[in-house]
Image: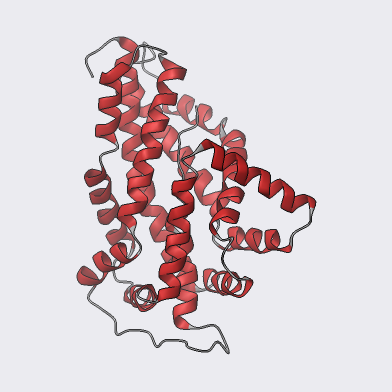
Amino acid sequence: MSQSFRLIPALAPLALGLALGLGAPGQAGAQSPAPNPPAEAGLPTLAETLAIGEVIAIMREEGIDYGRSLEAEMFPGRGGADWQRIVALIYDETTMRRRFDEAFGQAMAGDEATLAAALAFFGDARGQHFIRLEIDARRALLDDAVEDAAKARVDEMIAARDPRLQLIRRFVEANDLIEANVAGALNANLAFYRGMVEVGAFGEETAEADMLADVWGQEEQIRAETEGWLMPYLTLAYGPASDADLEAYIAFSQSPEGQRLNRALFAAFDAVFGKVSQDLGRAAARQMLGQDI
């Protein structure tokens, strides 16, 4: 069973923003990096500038939708309002944001150079534009019809050998979006199984090795689902972006600052979804066993 686990939107604005803010070689209008801010002041500012709250709000909507899919798959017709209530509590925005902030702060601890570079860009109109493109595309894909249209558009671009697809693929590779998201989904699924085992859903103690084997058996499916969602999402999000902007994004993504920021964001969202998934596993197991959730 594949957990709904999409971290991509938090990443794209970061690399592009830093690249544009610092300026590519020969680029006009480049800004000088801001002085290094104290981490305790700079990280909340960076998170707000990145609109992390909006990203988490969309993830909550996706999670509630996933909760409905989970009910249909595991205990059809037996969840009802109680199940919807517990899923909404698990995907509580305040709790998710607190967990993100804590993990992001730990991952970025002491890295004032990356923090300063990020803050230097994210006050820039161009960086904000890319953040909005990503968030708007993520929200639009909550509509199945929009997602189907985006997938059809990718098929058309493949048939036409549209060069924009090559840029998107380079972008994906530079940010390690496939591997990092697959790893995150596998970790989330393992946490889900652990939650189920804690409640006794399988009737007897299940060995960690058995859970790991089961989760690893899902890797191919998760990879296919990740790739199948990622390209439509990115082509939709970056449709209005110029090739030059995407080239700048790729250039930064390969830089030390881009790599560190990328890792910190994945670590933060992994922490959020690990806990969410374990809580979902416990709740689903209780529902299956007829316990009070």
Total numbered labels placed on residues in the image: 0
Residue at image coords 65%, 58%: 169
Image height check: is 95 above or below 65?
A: below
Query: Is residue 198 or residue 176 the one in the foreground?
Result: 176
Residue 163 pos. (x, y %):
73, 63
Residue 255 pos. (x, y %):
52, 73
Q: Is residue 198 visible?
A: no
Query: Is residue 134 or residue 40 the one in the foreground?
Result: 134
Give the quarter of the image for residue 254.
bottom right
Residue at image coords 42%, 54%: 266
The quadrant of the picture occupied by the C terminus is top left
Residue at image coords 24%, 33%: 89
Q: Is residue 244 visible?
A: yes
Q: For this view, does 142 lie left or right of residue 99?
A: right
Residue at image coords 38%, 44%: 59
Query: Is residue 140 or residue 121 the one in the foreground?
Result: 140
Image height check: is 80 above or below 277?
A: above
Give the quarter of the image for residue 53.
bottom left
